[in-house]
Amino acid sequence: MFERRLEGRVVVLTGGAGLLGRNHSVALARAGARVVVADIDRARAAEVAGGLPPEQGMAVGVDITSQSSVKNMIRCVVDRFGGIDALVNNAALDPKFDPQHAGLHTDSFERCPLEEFRRSLDVNLTGAFICTQAAAPFLLSSTCGSVVNVASIYGVSGPDQRLYLRDGGQVRYKPVAYSAAKSGLLGFTRYLAAYWAGRGIRVNALTLGGVEAGHDPEFVRRYSEKTMLGRMARQDEYGGALVFLLSDDSSYMTGANLVVDGGWTAW
């Protein structure tokens, strides 16, 4: 499907056992990469890695908010594969609005707990800093070093809280910390691209729109009406863009933000 564009390259994927991480892992493996499925849930990471072709998957448990945990992950990867060619900062605390998470995210901005804000920044932004810093020596020594930071449309535009109106009242909110962190991730991308200019590492962002995952029909309808394609994304529709950014097909791209959102931000 992806013509083995990443043949033999070692790609560390944080949040690899999550909803999109699982699909990213499959796409990377199909492109020929050796995929390090890194996740705080080691058991789920092992399940994902075990479903990849032999010798192409490796599972690592990691807390990306801990420097010691991340350094240990990097050591394990280098011990196994000898180096690192690419890093995908995909792990995130992403507020879910499916039935499984009903009753959450009811705090308005005025009532948002400080500890919740800090925790989201720790995972969604500081975690990318810690992982990239730890992987940097190996990315620099690779002949095809690449970093992709997975961002969100809510780092580009403000969340439309009207999506969460029911019966004339605001029942839920997209939290402020998510937007702040994803906006920061775009700045982090541009900083690193400029900092490593001419040193063989490309750094880009991949900004994604919403993925349908059992949301209530009213939310899906309202969200879909805001996209030019008239629907939410399928879970497997982002793999091609990720492979593209990591492969030589995007060799003249760095410091860029590839937006894949069904036209949400282009109106």
Image (cartoon, helix red, strand yellow):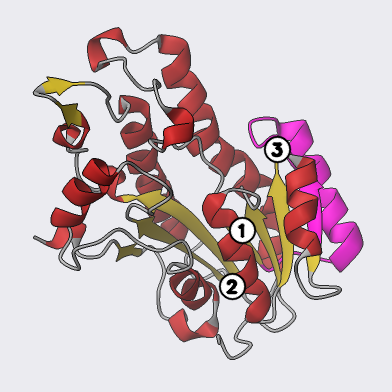
Q: Residues within 10 Å of mark 1 (few under 14, many from 20)?
A: many
| Horizontal relation, residue 219 to residue 5: left or right | left
Question: Distance between the Cα atoms at labels 2 and 1?
Answer: 9 Å
- Label pair 1/3, CB-CB below 8 angstroms: no
Mark 1 element type: helix
Write down the residue under mark 1. 22
Mark 3 element type: loop
x 19%, y 39%: residue: 158
Where residue 122 appears, x then y in whole percent? 53, 28
* 202 in magenta: no
Q: Earlier in the sequence, mark 2 or mark 3?
A: 2
Furthest residue to the bottom? 3
| Horizontal relation, residue 4 to residue 219: left or right | right
Q: Amino acid at mark 1?
A: Arg
* 69 in magenta: yes
Q: Amino acid at mark 2?
A: Ala
Please tell me whether mark 1 or mark 3 is closer to you in this view.
Answer: 1
Where residue 214 appears, x then y in whole percent? 41, 47
Foreground: 65 or 20?
A: 20
Where residue 254 appears, x then y in whole percent? 41, 68
x 25%, y 16%: residue: 109
Q: Earlier in the sequence, mark 1 or mark 3?
A: 1
Furthest residue to the right? 79
Write down the residue under mark 3. 40
x 41%, y 26%: residue: 102
Where residue 189 appears, x then y in whole percent? 42, 53
